Image: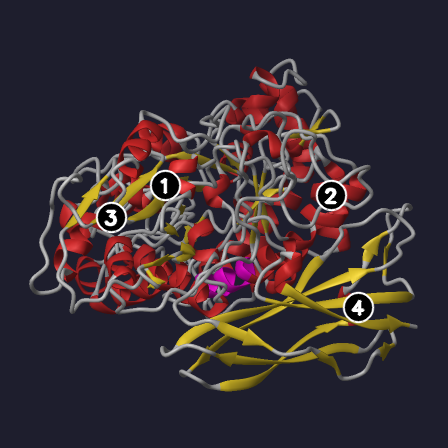
């Protein structure tokens, strides 16, 4: 019997797609445009609906689904996917990294790429080839429950870090045996919520989208990300799933995106049930296809709805064929017909949570720690604690020994999924703060003393999974569940306090926490977070992380992000400052870095030139340390209102004690654009200021002028 051309790996992808498409019947075509939750009924999804992709299955369950797909009439392999947001989230004992928000505080793109590569290897071992990550949403209203999934508040950094993770996931190409398909999400404007509520109507103009929300996604498309996912929200009355300006005109035509576009969970169903813009699933199916979507996630009703839409003439079968070509071509490019991606028990034992991966995770936890405060006690900074002076330590607070809070959302136990081997990751795989302090406690020190008897209090506060995630936005940013009272009582003891924050997003801190002698922001630091924190407290490492998101004094200060549009009447609230408690780009270490005066190589630049700024930096301390030198630009006069200042470059610089170095930062002048009142991206002539320093705060920056002509 002749082998069908679509089975012939020597044929071109175009030839294989043509041959397979010509053999498919309408139900098979519709099924290939669907992606369903494998926990529902994977057998029915494959055998009756010919589903093209499944998620939330791995290991033997993924293998069973793959085998079932190979037994169908045409044997089109199912593409297995999952939400591995900061590690292989739902595989018990896999390497769970700090959340995106925490990782971003490292300002280390190479580290993020390596973390994504680790995740890809572990996913592939368990039978998965597609990851729904990274998140490119722009953090705005901090009450939103998914702030932890973002890289923070700056579009430039989001583009930098997302690109790094895309490279890590996709590796050497879609046929790389250690690579997975990356997904840029949620496209676009999903994070611009009303009242912080999840998936509410986003009040966004096209100019605002073009200015801030779309640039990271354009960067992801240019990086070669092969999947985009739509958001839940609507913009100006148009749900993302049916926004042809976003999905077709911008993504496909303007940016040249050639990958697949998948809706978020039941987005097509929401057109009928929640947003109420379609009368039934037939209308919704037709609209989803005509709007440019390729794969419909978690809407099983799409199967019958789409078939009926073709029968009624609302859709032409040729319209399905055009989309199906992209989906099938992707499967051929990924090599699924030659290797459908079954799990490998030997590879699982060798790869998942191996020593190399744990080492990367520990490095990620170390670099992500942000030291916000380190006041003097007895004439010198409290931290690091001197191991030669034995003391009694109390470790207390709700997150001192809380693995789930430390791992954060999108991990076993967070509610999105349970595991056959248990509802949580093994306790032995997580080093909590209490574990880390206990393990690294110097000889002669004692733990855990009662707070009244301790010499030093390590108070671990934050939030928990009840206040995190989809549909879990918060009305306030206060510490919940009696933590303010606990902090007040500990502060009242008069002992030195190290406040440690393990939280999904910036919180409003009471005076008793702001008054602590030392404050660490860890966000959700992953499995090795407790070890990294203890190393920092006892001086084994020198913290170097800096915030990628601003922390307010009060929830009512929002928005508090650093790059707000200028033009306000007045500079403060009548009853409160508008300054954040801790600003974007801020973070301390145990080495004081001293900055000299900045210098611009060429202060008169043309639009094709490169802005180059040099600044002397010296490590003025007795320890090696890493400083993150930041370059911001202010366009002095713009034709339309614009952000006061924007980050355009940064450098991670590691220096020995006393070492001095001339740090150079550069940015193409072509990146100093604004979106003008007509919606055009332009670099305008005139005066600019380059600002260099250690954070976005005025007092941490030095300015030097230049012009663009």
What is the CA distance from the residue labelled 3 to the residue labelled 2?
40 Å
Q: Which residue is mark 3?
A: 59
Q: Secondary structure at mark 4?
A: helix
Q: Which residue is mark 4?
A: 670
Contact check, label 1 and label 3, Cβ < 8 Å: no
The segment highlighted magenta reads: 161-170
User: Looking at this view, is 647 or 124 the one in front?
Assistant: 647
Q: Closer to the N terminus: mark 2 or mark 4?
A: 2
Q: Residue furthest left?
A: 444
What is the CA distance from the residue labelled 4 to the residue labelled 3?
47 Å
What is the CA distance from the residue labelled 4 to the residue labelled 1?
38 Å
Q: Which residue is mark 1?
A: 410
What is the CA distance from the residue labelled 1 to the residue labelled 2?
27 Å
User: Looking at this view, is 526 or 174 the one in front?
Assistant: 526
Does 168 appear in magenta?
yes
**Residue 619 in view (yes/no):** yes
| Image position, residue 60 (x, y; %) | 22, 46
């Amino acid at each position: 019997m002749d082998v069908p051309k679509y089975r012939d790996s020597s044929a071109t992808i175009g030839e294989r797609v043509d041959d397979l498409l010509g053999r498919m019947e309408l139900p098979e075509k519709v099924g290939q445009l669907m992606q369903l939750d494998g926990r529902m009924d994977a057998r029915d999804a494959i055998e009756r609906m010919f589903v093209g992709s499944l998620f939330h299955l791995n290991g033997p369950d993924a293998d069973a689904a793959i085998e079932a797909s190979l037994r169908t009439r045409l044997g089109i392999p199912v593409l297995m996917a999952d939400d591995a947001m900061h590690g292989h989230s739902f595989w018990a004992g896999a390497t769970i990294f700090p959340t995106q928000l925490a990782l971003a505080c490292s300002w280390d793109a190479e580290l993020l790429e390596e973390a994504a590569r680790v995740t890809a290897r572990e996913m592939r071992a368990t039978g998965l080839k597609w990851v729904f990550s990274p998140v490119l949403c722009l953090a705005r209203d901090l009450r939103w429950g998914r702030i932890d999934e973002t890289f923070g508040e700056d579009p430039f950094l989001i583009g930098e870090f997302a690109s790094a993770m895309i490279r890590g996931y996709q590796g050497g190409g879609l046929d790389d045996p250690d690579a997975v398909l990356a997904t840029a999400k949620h496209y676009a404007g999903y994070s611009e919520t009303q009242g912080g509520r999840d998936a509410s109507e986003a009040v966004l103009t096209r100019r605002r989208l073009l200015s801030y929300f779309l640039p990271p996604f354009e960067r992801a498309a240019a990086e070669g990300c092969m999947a985009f996912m739509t958001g839940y929200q609507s913009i100006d009355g148009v749900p993302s799933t049916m926004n042809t300006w976003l999905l077709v005109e911008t993504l496909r035509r303007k940016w040249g995106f050639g990958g697949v576009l998948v809706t978020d969970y039941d987005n097509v169903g929401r057109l009928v049930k929640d947003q109420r813009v379609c009368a039934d699933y037939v209308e919704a199916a037709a609209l989803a296809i005509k709007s440019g979507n390729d794969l419909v996630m978690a809407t099983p009703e799409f199967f019958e709805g789409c078939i009926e839409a073709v029968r009624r003439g609302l859709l032409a079968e040729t319209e399905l064929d055009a989309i199906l070509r992209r989906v099938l071509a992707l499967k051929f490019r990924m090599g699924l017909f030659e290797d459908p991606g079954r799990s490998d028990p030997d590879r699982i034992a060798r790869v998942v949570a191996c020593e190399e991966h744990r080492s990367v995770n520990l490095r990620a936890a170390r670099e992500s720690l942000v030291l916000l405060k380190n006041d003097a006690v007895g004439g010198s900074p409290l931290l690091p604690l001197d191991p030669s002076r034995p003391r009694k330590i109390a470790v207390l607070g709700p997150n001192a020994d809380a693995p789930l809070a430390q791992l954060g959302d999108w991990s076993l136990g967070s509610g999105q999924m349970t595991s056959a081997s248990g509802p949580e990751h093994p306790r032995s795989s997580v080093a909590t703060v209490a574990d880390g302090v206990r393990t690294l406690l110097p000889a002669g020190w004692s733990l855990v003393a009662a707070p009244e008897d301790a010499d030093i209090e390590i108070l671990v506060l934050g939030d928990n999974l009840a206040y995190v995630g989809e549909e879990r936005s918060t009305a306030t940013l206060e510490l919940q569940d009696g933590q303010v009272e606990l902090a007040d009582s500990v502060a009242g003891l008069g002992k030195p306090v190290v406040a440690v924050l393990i939280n999904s997003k910036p919180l409003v801190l009471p005076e008793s926490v702001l008054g602590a002698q030392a404050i660490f922001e860890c966000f959700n630091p992953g499995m090795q977070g407790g070890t990294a924190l203890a190393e920092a407290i006892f001086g084994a490492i020198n913290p170097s992380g800096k915030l990628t998101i601003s922390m307010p004094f009060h929830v009512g200060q929002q928005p508090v992000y650093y790059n707000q549009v200028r033009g306000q009447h007045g500079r403060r609230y009548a009853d409160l400052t508008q300054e954040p408690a801790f600003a974007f780009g801020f973070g301390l270490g145990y080495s004081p870095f001293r900055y000299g005066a900045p210098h611009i190589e060429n202060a008169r630049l043309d639009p094709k030139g490169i802005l180059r700024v040099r600044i002397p930096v010296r490590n003025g301390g007795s320890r090696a340390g890493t400083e993150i030198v930041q370059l911001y630009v202010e366009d002095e006069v713009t034709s339309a209102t614009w952000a006061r200042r924007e980050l355009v470059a940064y450098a991670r610089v590691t220096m020995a004690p006393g070492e001095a170095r001339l740090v150079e930062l550069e940015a193409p002048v072509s990146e100093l654009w604004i979106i003008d009142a007509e919606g055009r991206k332009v670099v305008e002539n005139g005066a600019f200021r380059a600002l260099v320093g250690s954070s976005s705060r005025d007092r941490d920056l030095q300015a030097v002028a230049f012009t663009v002509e």
